[in-house]
Image: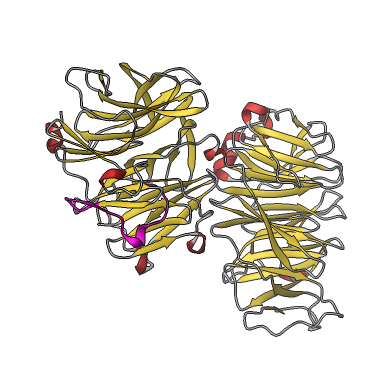
Amino acid sequence: MLASVAACPPPEPPRPIPPVSTGKVRVRVFTEPSPVRVLAAAERFVFVATEQDLERFDDGGGVFALTAQTGLSGSSVVALGPDSDRKSVWVLTDGGLGRYDVTSEVYSTITDPPASIGLDFASLAKEGATVASASDGGAWIGTSKGLIYVSAKGGWSSTPIKDPIKAVARDRSGWLWIATPTGLLARKPSGDTVRIGTAQGCTITTPRLLVELPGDRMMVIGGDADGRERLAFGAQQQFVTYRALPDVTWEAATRRANGAVVMGGGRVYRIGEPDPTRVRPLARDGMRLVAINGDGKQSPWEIDPLDLVVPPGATSLGASADQLLIGTRDLGTARYQIAGDGTARPRDWLRRKQMFQDATTLSVACSKVDDCWIATGARQAWHWTGDRFVAGGPDQVVLAVVREPGGPIYALHRAGAESALHLSRIEKGQWTPVGNVTLTAPGAAPEVSFARFPAGGQLWIGLRYRDGMEMRAGGLAIIEPATGKVTYHRPETSGDKLPIPVGVLDADVRGDVAWFATNEGVARVANGQVRLWTENDGLLSELARAVTIAANGGVIVATGAGAAIWDGKTWTFPPALRFELNDVVATRNGQVWMATERGIAAWDGTKVRRVDMRRGLAENQILDVASDQFDRVWARGPGSLTLISQ
C-alpha cells in the first residue's frame, strides 16, 4: 500500500525561511480578508468600507455588515460621504449610490442616473471616486470624468467641471472644494467656479487631500510645482502655504475637533490652533509648520505628534468627538480614545473576523506564490491573491484543501450537516466536482482532521464526526481521484486494509513508512505492520495531536505535555519543548514550527525561538500550523491568520 510513495515527484525547490533568530523572517498577520478603504464616523456608529462590504460598528464594537445580499447598491464600496447636518452617510459603490440614515438605521438606494450623465458605476472601483454632502441635502460626486451632482430626491445633473477629481469637500459656508491633477478648484454657492493658485496664496499644484476645518476654513495637502510636499490653510480665496519640518509625505488626513489629524512617515500628528495655556514640550521627534508665503506673522497652526504606535499597513484615518480611527490593510480598524488633553490611548479593534467564524482547522494549498486556497472548516474557502482574501468555492462547508505534488488542488466539502463529503478539483479558480467520489463517516456532520498526498494519485483523509456533543475520530480514507475509488481503513474493516487505530488525528509519510498521531498514542505503519507507542512505552502523553517528519527524518509529535521526538530507538521529550503544543509542521529548511498557547515556536534542533505578540502576532493563542510548497508557514489563531516567509 505504501510502496508507491517513493515514486512521488521531487518537491519544488522552496525559498527557505531563515532561522527566526536571524530576525530576517517576515511576519504578516491577517484578521480581515481585505484592506480598509475609507472610514466615516456618524453619531454612535463607525462605518468601515472595505473592498467587499460596508461594516457598521456601534459604540460597543457590535458589527452589522451591509452587502449586496443585504441591500447594498453594489458589491464594492468606493467612497463614503458623511452628512452631519442630516445624520446620514452617502455610500458610493460599484453598483450605485445610496444613503444610510443613522437615526432610523435604514439604507435607501438612489435612482440610477440617466445615460446622458455618463456615470459608469462599475468603473469607479478601478478608477476611484469621492463623494461629499451638499448644502441642500444632495451629494457631489467626483469622478475621473468630472463633477456630478445628485439631489436628495434622486435628480441627477452634470457640471462644467470635467477634470479628473481626486477629492471633494464642502465647508460650512457652502463652498465646494475640488482637488484635480491641475490644481485646486472652488465652486461658490452661486455656482461660479474659481481656480485657487499662487495668487490666492496656495502654491499646491497637485492637491490630493482635503479636510474641512472650523470657521469655514479648508486644509489642502499635495505637491507644489517642484513636487515638494505642502499644506495650505485658508478660506474662500485667501490661503497660506506651509512646509513641514522635517519633510513628510502625508498619506491620510481627517478632521477632528477644532483641527485635523494627519498621518505620514509612520507617525500620526495633530494639527490645530495654538493653545496659549499649554506649554509645548521639547521633543527630539517634534515637527513644526513653516509658512512659505503670507504676511510673516506667527503661524496660526501648530503640529504635534500623537504618542501612539501606528498599526502595520495603515491605510486611512477617521475621527469622531472622542475617538481616532486608523484603518489598516490586514488588521481591521484600530480605535483610540482621545482624552481631554489630546492624548490618544488604544481602546480596541473594530473587526468583523468573517474568515474565522465557525473555523475548526487550517489547510493551505497553493498553485503559485500569490495564488493559494485556505480552508478553515467553515463555510466557503478563501482565495489568497497575494494582497487580499476573497471568499470562493461552493456555498458549503469547506473542510480541507490539498495540493497533489506537481498537480492540481483538491477540496473536500459538504452541504450543511449532511453526512457525505464531496471532492472537487480547483484549477484556474474554477471548482469542478470529481464524479463518483463520496466519503461517509459513522455520524453526522463529518469533518476532516488532515488531508495529505503521500503518493501520486493517492489522497489520504483523516475523518472525524460528531456523536452528540462529542467529536470522535472516524479512521482513515484513501481516495484515488483518477478512478474515484475510496478505501476505508479502520480496525473493524477486513481485506487489504492498513491496520491503523481508529483515533487517527494526523499523519505524515516518508518513503514507505507512515506515522500517525492518534488519541491512543503514536502509530507507525511499515511493511504492512503497525507499531503503537503509548505512555507505557515512554510517552509523557499518549493523546497525540499532530505529527510531522523533519527534513533529517526525525519524527516530532505534538502533545499536551510537549513535543515527543523519535530518535530511531526511543522517544524523548526535550526540556526546551515541554510546553503544550496544539499542532506541529516541519519545513524543508530543517526548522520545526509549533502552534502553542504562547505564540508560534520555531525549533532548529537546538534552540527554540518564539514569534508572539511582541513580534507582530495579533494573539498568542495559535491553534494550527501548516506549510506550503514554497516553505512558507501559515498559522491560525481564534481570530487571526499569520503568514511567515522570507
In this rendering, is residue 228 above or below 65?
below
In-front residue for pair 72/473: 473
In-front residue for pair 533/197: 533
Residue that extends furthest to the top in the rendered view of this protein: 436
100 in magenta: no
**Horizontally, is 307 left or right of 550 in the view?**
right
Q: Which residues are magenta?
A: 566-584
In-front residue for pair 488/484: 488
Which residue lies at the image location 55% right of the left edge and 36% below the top edge?
357
**Horizontally, is 216 left or right of 393 in the view?**
right
Residue that extends furthest to the front in the rendered view of this protein: 536
Residue 2 horizontal/vertical position (percent): 15, 32
Residue 600 horizontal/vertical position (percent): 42, 55
**Horizontally, is 302 left or right of 451 in the view?**
right
The quarter of the picture where the C terminus appears is bottom left
568 in magenta: yes
Question: Quadrant of the rendered structure where residue 450 is?
Answer: top left
